[in-house]
Amino acid sequence: MGVTGHGASVFRRMPNAEEPKIIQILAGQSAGLAAAVSIAAMFSYRHAFHAGNHADVLKHITLMALLDYLTRKDTALTVIDTHAGAGLYRLDGDHSQTSGEAGEGILRLAQVLRQSPGELALPIQRYRDLLASLNPAFAQSGDPHGLRVYPGSPYIAAQFMQGRHKLKLFELHPTDFRALSGHVEQLELGRSVSCALQDGFEALRPLLPPPSRRALVFCDPSYEMKTDYARVHTCLGEAVKRFPTGCYALWYPIIPRPEAHELPKKLRTLANRAGRPWLDATLTVKGSKLHTTAEGEVIRPGLPASGMFVINPPYTLHDELKTALPLLVDWLGQDRNASFGLARGD
Ligand SMILES: C[S@@+](CC[C@H](N)C(=O)[O-])C[C@H]1O[C@@H](n2cnc3c(N)ncnc32)[C@H](O)[C@@H]1O
């Protein structure tokens, strides 16, 4: 299976991030420079740098818990992944090794699981099993070095696509889209999975409500552009209006930035006004303050925390996350700021 690895960071630009040619040309012109710069910002994000970090651990454990419940019924479920990424990533490739982010996420988790094998909370067991199915050396030994491939949301969702369920993937980065298309083709799932080089925010509206009236919308923007915060809010607001009973799951970063701070509050208001139940799960692994080394170097802490906001969560989700989140804090926490949050509204 061919797996890709590439990218730049939402929080930290990588020195070797390659920009597509068209963006370099656009950014070199004076007319529409602001627009070009924000397009360039979007295209500079590559999830390969972040695959398997602590945010992915929270995101993918939640996604699997949602899919596990929602695909139990025979009635067709439409899964819409608005920001799909490349689908599969190398953990032993340059991008992952440069950022080292997986070391604070899945690799750290795998190390703990190896040292203390035994019965696991169901959501973590499910996630571990998926990683083992992709990584035979890890499955055999439990050694984190055996983890070479990390599944993105499209690959995870595809594992649940038996029967009549449908998976619709959207990705705007041309290189990641090419990789995604190749990975989808290799899965040989026929017409149950489709992918498009399209803006996921725009693509969502006409798909709702789906014919079977059952959908999971997974929305995972890079927030590389400041406008993403407003766009997710507007997009989810419209989606809930068009299709109030759909399940909507959104990932968001917790960083010291006003738009990021406001987003979960706005989402709670949105869900409350629509009269829909919601769940908000957060995982903090470290504090967000800059610190200075003895040599005077200022260290940025990287992404300290993130959250998953779910509108119309299955009734099982709260209890599942309640078993998993305290363990993730123990295992992935790096300082005294490590904590989790689990709130809900009806
Ligand atoms: C955080 S990554 C997605 C990771 C993926 N959901 C996963 O869990 O494996 C966000 C992706 O969205 C893409 N993207 C950014 N803006 C987009 C848009 N408006 N529509 C679709 N994709 C977009 C980026 O190129 C990037 O690959």
Image: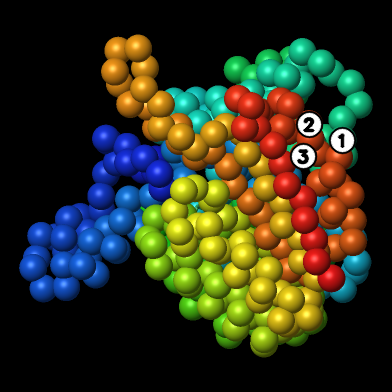
Earlier sequence position, callout 1 versus callout 2: 1
Earlier sequence position, callout 3 versus callout 1: 1
> Dot 3 lies on which element?
helix
Left/right placement of residue 307 relative to residue 4 reads right
CB under 8 Å between discs 2 and 3: yes
Quadrant in the rendering for residue 67: bottom right
Q: Which residue is mark 1?
A: 121
User: Between 231 and 210, which is closer to the camera in this rendering?
Assistant: 231
Q: Is residue 15 visible?
A: yes
Q: Which residue is mark 2?
A: 327
Instruction: Classify mark 1: residues with Cα within 10 Å, few (<14), some (14-19) or many (20+).
Output: some
- How many angstroms separate mark 1 from mark 2 (CA)? 9 Å
Q: Residue at x 69, y 37 (%)?
A: 339
Position of 225 relative to 182 (above/below) = below
Quarter of the picture holding the C terminus: bottom right
Q: Which residue is mark 3?
A: 325
Amino acid type of the residue tagged 1 in the rendering: Ala
Q: Residue at x 9, y 65 (%)?
A: 29
Left/right placement of residue 55 relative to residue 94 reads right
Residue 178: x, y in percent?
43, 55
User: Between 191 and 67, which is closer to the camera in this rendering?
Assistant: 67
- How many angstroms separate mark 2 from mark 3 (CA)? 5 Å
Residue 298: x, y in percent?
33, 26
- How many angstroms separate mark 3 from mark 1 (CA)? 10 Å
